[in-house]
Amino acid sequence: MVFLLLYSLSWGQSEKDGLGGRHELKLNALSTLAGYFEASYDYILNDESSLGISAGFSFDQDIEYNFMIVPNYRFFFGKKPASGFFIEANMAIFSQEEQANAFIGTVNANNGNNHLGLGAGIVIGGKFISTKNGFVGELFAGGGRNFLNKDLIDSGYPRIGISIGKRF
């Protein structure tokens, strides 16, 4: 009985607010094609903002980032709810292979050690949504500054993508 009550309350809320749902699941198609799987979840707070988290891991040995977890807050400037141009503030925790200062030929020599990075960053982008079926598309680019182990790994981290997903 409690489950049915909670379900009906959550269903009614998404119908009244015009958002078409408050939850989004997305896959970063660009990074996945490049050898780095990244999936995201966003919770729509209101017409102009959302909270989200992205998690990714490398399945290609040429990519030096092993994993990355990025919680974020987005502020939207579009006419449709939680869509259009946005600015994202984020934090990231990631693992990266140690960078060596010595180059052997044209290949960067490293010793294979992994180190954690922790940083904060900014992203700009656009979110497009189909109001009929809730499909979402995003384009975004930006990055952040690393504050941890900067002498062993990069001093920054990238955030770039073309994501597709669904709002429900």
Image (cartoon, rainbow, N blue to C red):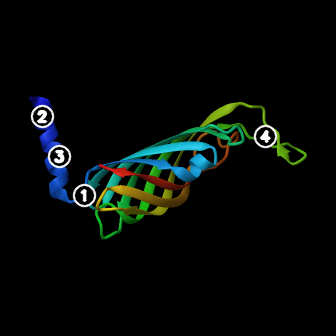
Q: CA distance from mark 2 to mark 1?
A: 22 Å
Query: First in sequence: mark 3 or mark 4?
Result: 3
Disc 1 crowd rating (10 Å Cα; few below 14, some 14-19, many 20+) is: many
Query: First in sequence: mark 1 or mark 3?
Result: 3
Q: In front: mark 1 or mark 4?
A: 1
Question: Mark 2–mark 1 contact, CB under 8 Å?
Answer: no
Residue beneath disc 2:
4
Q: Position of residue 67 (x, y in %)?
A: 57, 37
Residue beneath disc 3:
11
Q: Nearer the viewer, residue 54 or 4?
A: 4
Q: CA distance from mark 3 to mark 4?
A: 54 Å
Q: In front: mark 2 or mark 1?
A: 2
Q: Is residue 119 left or right of residue 6?
A: right
Residue under the image location 52 percent in, 44 percent down? 38
Three-letter code, disc 3:
Trp
What SS does tag 3 mark? helix
What SS does tag 1 mark? loop
Q: CA distance from mark 3 to mark 2?
A: 10 Å
Three-letter code, disc 1:
Leu
Residue beneath disc 4:
100
Residue under the image location 70 percent in, 42 percent down? 151
Instruction: Specify the quadrant that holds the N terminus.
Output: top left
Query: First in sequence: mark 3 or mark 2?
Result: 2
Q: In front: mark 4 or mark 2?
A: 2
Q: Residue furthest right?
A: 105
